[in-house]
């Protein structure tokens, strides 16, 4: 099972090829942000390294959001273009759940621990989601303004909350609860998508290429210029 995984929900540009849910080849550049220029180049380099054609893929997976409006649109547009042209299944992977998988992979939370993902949505606003250590969903992605007591309602007695995502530093500044473990997993990666995209492929959880749209959650920040001359 060969899947191309595409992650563009933040400034990180990341693509990978996975075999049966395991990372084979990855191309990633943090803080690049120029997805429109780099994404197709990254994919071409990836396939050249693998000595394969896009026709050899079994499916294309894309980070579904929430995240950057522009980044998500670029990633989904490229993924849909490949899937439509080559008649390959399109898989949409929840961005926050994929980051939580990174915590499961590297931090090894205990069976009673929780994983909270917080992604920056400007100022003290975040996109958040809460998962058990086995990645079962406790609270689906939602919009939140951070406060010092945020997430305490999800803290089981005697357990810990592993916080991850690119808004962790914001939360560190307002909370010092010893039950909060701040993970080093602070950005999305196509590597974190691979196991999830494999599971969705086996379950045949595919998207309609013609109608699929990413999960923006929050509308784009569009302003009207004051000077119209």
Image (cartoon, grey):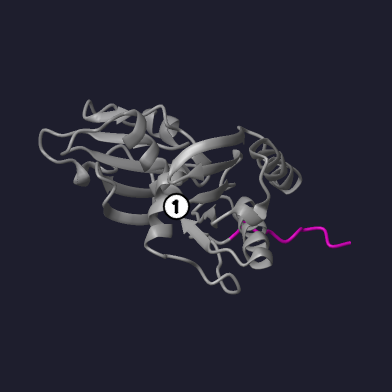
Left or right: where 76 falls relative to 133: right
Which residue is located at x 17 percent, y 38 percent?
111
Q: Position of residue 91 (x, y in %)?
A: 50, 60
Which residue is located at x 63 percent, y 50 percent?
71
Q: Describe the element under mark 1 as helix, strand or loop.
A: helix
Q: Quadrant of residue 202?
A: bottom left
Q: Which residues are magenta?
A: 220-229
Q: Position of residue 58 (x, y in %)?
A: 54, 57
**32 and 178: which is toward the camera:** 32
Q: Quadrant of residue 148?
A: top left
Q: Is residue 188 visible?
A: no
Q: Main secondary structure of the magenta part?
A: loop
Left or right: where 102 falls relative to 67: left
Q: Label 1: few (<14), some or many (≥20) within 10 Å?
A: many
Up/down of 199 relative to 49, above or below: below
State the quadrant of the C terminus: bottom right
**123 and 134: which is toward the camera:** 134
Q: Is residue 158 found inside the magenta-colored segment of the image?
A: no
Q: Disc 1 designates what residue? A: 197
Q: Position of residue 199 (x, y in %)?
A: 38, 54
Up/down of 208 relative to 190, above or below: below
Q: Is residue 226 found inside the magenta-colored segment of the image?
A: yes
**101 and 172: which is toward the camera:** 101
């Amino acid at each position: 099972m060969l899947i191309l995984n595409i992650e563009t929900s933040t400034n990180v540009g990341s693509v990978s090829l996975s075999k049966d849910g395991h990372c084979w080849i990855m191309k990633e550049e943090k803080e690049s942000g120029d997805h429109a220029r780099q994404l197709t180049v990254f994919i071409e380099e990836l396939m050249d390294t693998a000595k394969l054609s896009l026709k050899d893929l079994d499916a294309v997976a894309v980070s579904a959001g929430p995240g950057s409006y522009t980044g998500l649109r670029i990633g989904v547009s490229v993924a849909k273009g490949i899937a439509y042209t080559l008649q390959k299944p399109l898989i949409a992977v929840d961005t926050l759940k994929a980051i939580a998988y990174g915590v499961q992979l590297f931090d090894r939370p205990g069976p009673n621990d929780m994983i909270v993902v917080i992604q920056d949505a400007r100022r003290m606003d975040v996109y958040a989601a809460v998962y058990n250590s086995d990645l079962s969903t406790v609270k689906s992605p939602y919009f939140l303004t951070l406060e010092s007591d945020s997430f305490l309602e999800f803290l089981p007695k005697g357990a810990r909350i592993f916080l991850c995502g690119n808004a962790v530093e914001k939360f560190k500044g307002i909370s010092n609860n010893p039950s909060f473990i701040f993970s080093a997993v602070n950005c999305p990666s196509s590597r974190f998508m691979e196991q999830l995209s494999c599971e969705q492929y086996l379950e045949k959880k595919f998207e309609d290429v013609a109608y699929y749209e990413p999960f923006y959650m929050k509308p784009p920040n569009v302003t009207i210029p004051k000077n119209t001359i």
